[in-house]
Image (cartoon, helix red, strand yellow):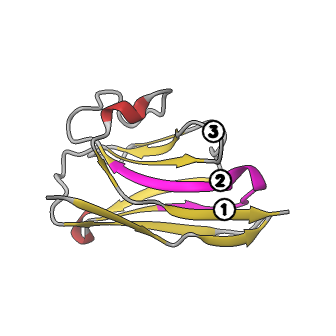
Amino acid sequence: QVQLVESGGGSVQTGGSLTLSCAGIGYIDSNDCMAWFRQAPGKEREGVAAIDIDGGAGYADSVKGRFTISQDNAKSTLYLHMNSLEPKDTAMYYCAAAGRDYLLCPHVVPEMELAFGIWGQGTQVTVSS
């Protein structure tokens, strides 16, 4: 059974950077669409970035130009490089895999999380002003 384990979260000040990692323990199908989501307290989970089998990437408007998603298939690891962090980026961040179910990959659209069936446990990112 595929397991996803996130790491790299932490506390930073406004303008700081973090890189999140998501290790796929087991097997990540090379055809999977991988993505990062986040959920802030009291808010719905939202898609942040997605990457498809060809390395094509998509981003939420709120993070374009600041976040970069990448994947190392040899290491079965997904990354989210976050720069110019702002307090509004504070949230629990989750990685997820969609298999072949997310046909819009790598576009980030509302309710895209419904197509993702494999999730990690999350890693907390806190940005202070």
Please say if 10 is above or below 122. Answer: below
Pointer 3 or 2: first along the chain: 3
- Indicate whether residue 74 is drawn in magenta: no
What residue is at 48 percent from the left and 28 percent from the top?
109
Q: Which marked residue is nearer to the observer: mark 3 or mark 2?
A: 3
Quarter-wise, where is residue 78 in the image? bottom left
What are the residue bounds of the magenta stretch?
Answer: 80-96
Tag on residue 66?
2
Circle 1: residue type: Asn
Q: Secondary structure at mark 2?
A: loop
Q: Residues within 10 Å of mark 3 (few under 14, many from 20)?
A: few
Q: Where's residue 73, x and y in %?
A: 25, 63
- Foreground pick, 45 / 29: 45
Q: What is the three-letter code of the residue carrying label 3? A: Lys
Q: Is residue 19 left or right of residue 90?
A: left
Measure how far apart labels 1 and 3 are at the Cα level. 22 Å
At label 2, the amino acid type is Arg
Residue underneath mark 3: 43
Q: Position of residue 32 (x, y in %)?
A: 23, 46
Residue displayed at 54% across by 68% down: 19
Q: Nearer the viewer, residue 48 or 113?
A: 113
Q: Position of residue 65 (x, y in %)?
A: 65, 48
Q: Are marks 1 and 2 in contact (CB under 8 Å)?
A: yes
Q: Furthest-right residue in view?
A: 129
Taking the magenta stretch, the answer to whether it contains residue 86 is: yes
Q: Left or right: 115 with respect to 31?
A: right
Quadrant location of residue 76?
bottom left
